[in-house]
Each structure stands twice: as C-alpha cells, then as structure tokens.
Image (spheres, grey):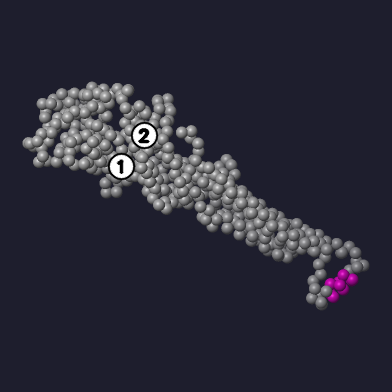
Amino acid sequence: MSFKTNGRIRKPCLEIMLSREVSPSYVFLKEFLSLGVLKHQQKDFHLTEYPQGRHHISWSSMVGCRNRGVPDMLEDTDWEVEGAEPTEIAVQMIIQAFSSISSVFMEYGIDVYLLQKWCDPRLMFNETQSSLYIQDPELIAKVWLPDTYFTNVRDASVHQLNIPNINMRITHNGHLLYGMRLSMKLSCNHHLKMFPFDVQYCSTILSSYGNTDSVVRYNWAENSPISIQDDLNAFRFKFTHFEAKEMNTSTPIGNFSSLYVSFLLNRPNSFHLLQTFIPTGLVVVISWASFWLDPTAVPGRISLGVSTLLIMTTLTSNIRQKFNPSSHVHAMEQWLEACQLMVFAALLEFPLVNWLANRGKNVGNNNNSDSSIKIGERMHSIESGVVPSNGHLKRAHVVDYIARCIFPSIFITFNVFYWTFYTYSRSEQNPFPDLGI
C-alpha cells in the first residue's frame, strides 16, 4: 500500500516484508524507526505485507535510501508545505497539583500530565492489533513530535521516577497520543492592591516554538480539555475556576496557533487573620491599658507605651519582608499603618496627661499665708481616707477617661468600614482579563 502525505505521492523508499510468525507491529516499529525516516512530516513510505516467510527488509527496493544516508535524505526532502493542510494537535491537561505560589517571586508551580494527539498518515499499518505502546525515549525521539512549549515557563522538568514519565500510543490508522508528566514553574503577575483579600489568576499559553499556524494548529480536546482533581488547593490559595481558550499570536516571524488557560485562585483569609490581623489588633488593645494607670506613674506608662510601639514595629517589619514591595498601598499596608498610628497616639497621650498632672504642683508655694490652711485640709483628708486632687490632676484624669472612650470607638469604627469595604470589593472582583479572543 502507498500513502499520500501533504497532497504529494512520494517514490517508495522502504519496503518491509512481514511474517505471521513474528509480531508485525514489532517489526514495523523496530525497522521503520531505525531508519530515522519518521523524524519529519514530509516522508512517505511503502509497506508490503507477505503472507509467508520470515521478516526481512527488501534492500533491492531501498538501495537509493541506503546509499544516500540520512543527511542526503534530509537534503532531498521537499520541505515546501504551502497549500498543505496543517497538522491538528489536540491538547489535554490533567492538573495534579499546584505548588509554590509566591507573591514575592511572582510565580506558581504545577504538576501536570500533558497529552497531545495528532494524526501522521505515515504511521498507518494493517494490523489486527489496535495500537502500539511505546515507552522507550530513544524510539519516541525518532518520531516527529510537535515543538510545544509554555510561553511563560521559568523552569520545567520531566518526572524521572524509575523511568522517564513519557509514553506514546500509535493506532493502526496513524493517530498518535503522546503524554508526559511535567513539573513547571511559571511566571504569574500578582495584583496585590486588594491583598490579602485578592483573587489571583495565573495563566499560561501553549504554542509551537518554530512552526506557524500554516504547519501546526493547536486545539483543546473536545472532552475535558482541562481536568483537575477534586478539592485541589494550593498553598495559601484555593482553586475555584479555570478558563481555556484558543487564540492566534502574531509575531514578526508569522502567526502562531496558541492555547490559553487561566486558573482562578482565591486567597483564604484564615491564615492572615491568625498571623497578622489578630496579633496586631491585640497590640493596639494592650496599648490602651496605660489609660487606666495613674497619671503620675511615669515609669509604668512609658514602659508600656514604648514596648507596644516596638512590638508593633517588629511585627510590621516581619510581615512586610514576606511580600514583594509594590508601588501602591494594598489592604494589608492600610491595616498595619492604622495599627501603628493607634499605638503611637496612645503613647503620645501620656505626655499630655503627665503635663496636666504636674502643671500646678508648685502653684501654692508662693502664697505663704495660705500654707497652714492647706496643710490642715490635707491632714483632715488623710484622716478621713480621701486623697485630695488639685484641679490640674482632675483634668489629667478627665483626659484619660476621654481616651478610654475615644480610642476604642475609633478603632471599632475603622474595623467596621475596613472589613465591610474589602469584603464587598472582593466579591466584585473580575479576575479574568478580556483577551479579545
């Protein structure tokens, strides 16, 4: 039988005699691939099946190929493919895990089983066996493979547990199913304005590295182009949705067929609630304890105010080191700045109170005529168990009393507006961009 590829019938270059004593599929695979003629799409061959006899290669019918060798064969090959139908590649991705999603390095990792299916008429064979299964990388390397790559990949590797995790299945009608298990790190631009109430989308584009859409065209598989395990979550993120599209990419070299996929990742608040919001909020509440201390207790109030300010500064510094510096203030920055401002204001309240308490301490010393009366009143008060307070000390207590009411009220009001605004804004986010495709 002879095959026609890309609209041209080539002169037979290979003739194989097969016997029924040896597996024809093995003979076909071993002998055909060993000649290296499957490396390119434009090669044709002639396959002959004999009912009897042991398998052998008809050297008389392939003297030309033997004398020329592989370099000459490649040189004589007609690479012109204009007007020919492009090879259709159906792609399916099975996502097995998300890993190392980093807002600092702007990247994410995935473990994926990538399946590609296409038809190569040169691999058609008359065989009762429905398909051939190949797992030898050397044999797979001899077959023409699409030069698929991920446009935003930073690092990638094929799993090598026991053997390389790649395989190929060839059916008798020339359909190939090529699968490989990959671990990849892909770049992902995080939009951190709403952090930690943000919803991130991390995408990638599959395309051919060197073949334009006139040679290779990519399509998502009709059934389940993207398969994801149930309850698949990433570190500090929860997977919620994906979007897959087919698109064309225009470059100075030409137009390339591409496949676009975007993963929607929702950041849960529980981690940052326990690690950031609650600790910093408690520091703010602790700073209010100085309002209940005596205005004249200078060491205690200063120690408490300075300690809470240092703790707040340390927490803020440690939190900021975990995230990539951005040009805009995100939601976490607003919270930290508000907490620092509340703690600093509580510390500044004490000098005002202390100044009021000691303002009139020596006012009565200039009037010697009233000193005996004041001493008598103080002795009477001590005997009755009441410690007198001058007007300035009363004003200091009034300031403390006002601070006890105002500071919690301001912080509670800020929390109400803060959480209401960002909870509503999170629900209104539309992370999938309009690609115009």
Q: Is residue 218 left or right of residue 5?
A: right
Amino acid type at mark 1: Gly
Say which residue label 1 marks.
179
Q: Residue at x 42, y 53 (%)?
A: 231
Q: Is residue 223 left or right of residue 46?
A: right
Highlighted range, magenta: 372-380
- Residue 344 placement (x, y as % from top left): 67, 54
Say which residue label 2 marks.
218
- Residue 437 placement (x, y as % from top left): 46, 33
Is 181 magenta? The answer is no
Note whether residue 357 is visible. no
Callout 2: helix, strand or loop?
strand
Alpha carbons under labels 1 and 2: distance apart: 15 Å
Callout 1: helix, strand or loop?
strand
Q: Residue at x 77, y 58 (%)?
A: 355
SS assignment for the magenta stretch, majority: helix
The local crowd at label 1, few if under 14, some if 14 to 19, many if 20 or more residues have their Cα within 10 Å, is: some
Q: Is residue 166 left or right of residue 95?
A: left
Amino acid type at mark 2: Tyr
